[in-house]
Image (cartoon, grey):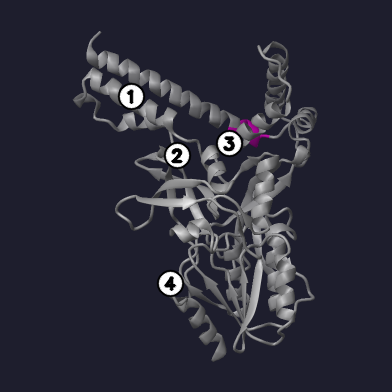
Amino acid sequence: MAQPLRRALVLTALLVVVAAAFGAGRHLRQVTSRRATPPAQAIVETRVAGTSLGAAPPSQEAGDAAETFLQVQRYLLTEYVDRITDTRKLGQGAVRAMALSLDDPMTRFHDPEQRKELERQMAGRFSGIGATLRVVKEKRDGVDQRRVAVVAPVPGGPADKAGLRAGDVIEELDGKWIIAYDPRLDLNRLELRSLDNAAYLKALKEAQKKLTDGVTLTRALTVLTTGSGKALTLTVRRPGSSAPLKVGVTTAETVIPPVEARPIGTVTYVRVATFGGSAGQEFAAALKARPNTPVLLDLRDNAGGPYTDRRAGALGSAIAIGQALGAKGTMGAVVRRGGRREPIEVSSTAAPKRRVAVLVNGGTSNVAELVAQALREQLGARLVGSKTFGDGVAQKLVPLQGGSALVVNAGKLVTAGGAEFAGKGLQPDVAVTPGPDDPALRRGVALLARR
């Protein structure tokens, strides 16, 4: 067989496999986006997830998908060569694949252990490298890729001590590539006519080896966010750096209080490190202890977080903070499917308005950005520091049966004035370059002391 023909057949077979994979994912997205019949929905909810995410009108195709799942489950339980003793794995695997089929890194299934770790982080207890991490989508050389990005290193944690920064992308873990895409797609960009058949097959083999030797995103996140006492070597791509960086870090348990407050002259300085747990109540208590003083709110390296409803989780803390500072009415909204706006409202019992400045940096993300911008709009607060991360996704935490949970991209966060910050972040009013003596803190105190 002539070399060009053989090469064309290899490439065609590869493209068929890739197209089938993407087609299956696209079909799954279409199925899950359509509405299920009540009987099929009940089957899936009780046997797979065990909870109701809301009723839906009928759709024969979604019903067929549910029946297909049950058919496969029955065959595995009766025909698989080894006896399956833990049927929960089947259900969890199906739900995990369902979330992955949406091709949205902000929608993930968490098994019971992963949910516990998420809730620990929301309460200020971090394991692993001590950083909030996120899978981000990016397009490079025409290919959609998924990368592990550092949103915010925990102050004093292993990542912080090792010099990792917000915006760093972790590309390798102990010398193994964190799989960001199917490297066989790179063959589409090769100058095929300049390669003989042997060279082409060698390139294909190398791409397959890179894939099989790599570390999955799920595995990488598990290693990076759990355990202590393990030395890791990370290969990091940093914006603005011409070459990758090698960073050594040893995992450890890092505990940070959600709220820390202290007086600095006539200013009340309050750092809110996380919006989980009792952060809102602790913030209100700190301000109550020092009434009528200007407040320097430090939201640096606060990565926000998911919410369970509009008055609980991260949004509940955001409302409590706004209320304690004297914000009133609508602080912002979650823009849901179809442009429907669900307001984030402060109750009418708001405290007297305070003079406020807010410290921000590249680790200020998500709900923390919402709070910073809402305080700028409502109270005239000035933002001091550097540009924020730019994550406007409203992530909703849905508890599931058996201790697992679904974190779903439920919409977009916007402030009361309609300001969007997704993908672009917030620019500070007073830009300050970080330094060893914390010049942003000094500048923020000076702003409030002289007003």
Q: Amino acid at mark 4?
A: Pro
Q: Amino acid at mark 1?
A: Leu
Whether residue 380 sits left or right of residue 160 in the image: it is right
Distance in Å between CA atoms under marks 3 and 4: 38 Å
**Cβ atoms under marks 3 and 4 closer than 8 Å:** no
Q: Nearer the viewer, residue 431 or 276?
A: 276
* Location of mark 3 (residue): 100
Residue at point 64% right, 54% down? Answer: 121
Q: Secondary structure at mark 4?
A: loop
Check disc 1: other Cα within 10 Å, few if <14, some if 14-19, many if 20+. Answer: many
Q: What stretch of residues is rendered in magenta?
A: 29-34
Mark before the other along the chain sequence, 2 or 1: 2
Indicate the position of residue 88 as horizontal and vertical percent values.
Answer: 72, 29
Residue 165 in sight in this render: no
Distance in Å between CA atoms under marks 1 and 3: 26 Å
Distance in Å between CA atoms under marks 2 and 4: 30 Å
Q: Is residue 31 magenta?
A: yes
Residue at point 52% right, 70% down? Answer: 360
Q: Which mark is residue 434?
A: 4
* Location of mark 1 (residue): 204
Tell me the mark number nearer the camera, choosing from 1 and 3: 1
Q: Amino acid at mark 2?
A: Ile
Mark before the other along the chain sequence, 2 or 4: 2
